[in-house]
Amino acid sequence: MYELSRVRLYSIGPAGARYADTVLDLRGVGEPVPDPAPTQAEFFEEEPVGPPRRPAPAGVLFLENGGGKSVLLKLIFSVMLPGHRNTLGGASSGVLRKFLLADDCGHVALEWQHVLTGECVVVGKVSEWRGRQVSNDPRKFAEAWYSFRPGPGLSLDNLPVAESTAVRPPVEGQSGARGRRRTMKGFRDALMEAGKTYPHLEVHWEEIHDRWIEHLGDLGLDPELFRYQREMNADEGEAAGLFAVKKDADFTDLLLRAVTDTRDTDGLADLVSGFGNKLGRRAELIAERDFTAGSVDLLGRIVEAAEARARARDVHAGAERRTRTLARRLSARGVQERARAADLAQRVTAAAYAVTHAEAARERSALISAELAYRHASLALAAAEKSAAAQKRELADARTLYSAWQAAEAVLRHRAAADRVARVSAAIQEAERDAAPALAARSKAAVDLVRALHAAAEKAEHHANE
């Protein structure tokens, strides 16, 4: 069993009281969920604190007369009880179409929470005018229903009702939808794309009333309960009015409608009524059948002949039409081909002139290139010769400098030796000057010694001789 948790209304309502983007939040004020199912939060959503709680068991909406209470109920019942005959508050079949303007794509989304597991399911309705024009033709009023399990990727807060939806946490009184409103097709494509991207959403889309009612039953939302609610709120009276029956047959009808499917009984009643009408007109129908059989036999030949003549006329007309079309095409093709031939001839002449001009330009360019190459080579040769001469001069200067550096050491040694020789000569001369008297005395003594020696030698010889 599910309980209503939130209601979101977007771009829908009467002209004087529009629901731009309204969310009625009934969450988190009831009893704790007895057996909570594991859930995965959104990426930007805060971690839940404590066990999940059921929605509010009851609520009161205080509005003045004409404030929109019946409009809210009509929009909610339009999701759970599709079809104009289930409209709340009377038999007006166009009351829901009055809640939608020409440029609107109205949305009514209901979030239901399971009383035992806390799992949520979102069911909604989207509607718009085909061609963006308000009309009295109900066929131009497009409606569709959808459902999904909210989770990462899609929830009631970020329904793709607009081209951009805010990712940040919702703020009270501010809409998360940004940008241009999506059309029904754009909303359906975005919803189905989200279903393909996130398979856990279990997105379902339906446009047929009966199939939508069956899908609600599969989800665990019994539309029959809402039919009772609709009947109890048909005239904004109490629930006791539903059971205020005058006869036993009325109570029996109420009980049979509650336990049986009215679609099957309605079909059976229509079938029995049809058979009864046909049996009442049996004689008339037999005579009509005989007359029709004879007429068909006679008219069949006429129809066959007429069809054969029509086919022949169609074949002839088609052949004549194709022949004329072919002639016009051939004539037009001939004109086009002649124009193309003339154009091609002009292009050939222009191409030949361009080729001649290009060859002359190529020859002139070849001569210019050769002259430029010769001049470039001459300049390069002159620059090379000048560079070689400069390098030779640099080599001679380098060799001279190298020889000078090599001779520098010998010159320094020669200068040092000359300085030492001069100093030694000066010292010798000074020493000779200082030793001159001694040398003179030595020379005199030597002479005296020699003389004495000569005398002694003579004496010795003389003695030897003796």
Image (cartoon, rainbow, N blue to C red):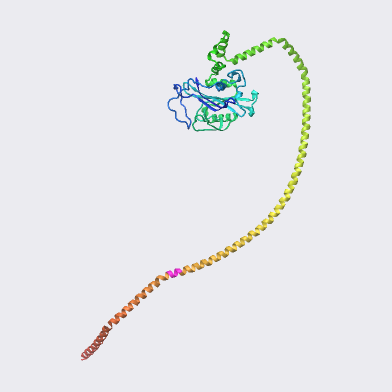
The answer to which of 183 and 195 lies nearer the viewer is 183
Q: Quadrant of residue 290?
A: top right
Whether residue 415 is situated above or below residue 305 in the rendered picture: below
Q: Which residues are magenta?
A: 401-405
Residue 371 magenta: no
Q: Quadrant of residue 50?
A: top left
**Residue 394, position as x, y percentages in the image:** 49, 67
**Residue 367, position as x, y percentages in the image:** 65, 59
**Can residue 333 be seen here?**
yes
Query: What is the magenta segment's predominant secondary structure?
Result: helix
The answer to which of 111 and 11 lies nearer the viewer is 11
Which quarter of the rendered picture does the C terminus lie within?
Answer: bottom left
Residue for point 78% across, 20% down: 301
**Residue 44, position as x, y percentages in the image:** 48, 32
Q: Could you tell me how many numbered marks the image carries?
A: 0
Residue for point 74% across, 13% down: 288
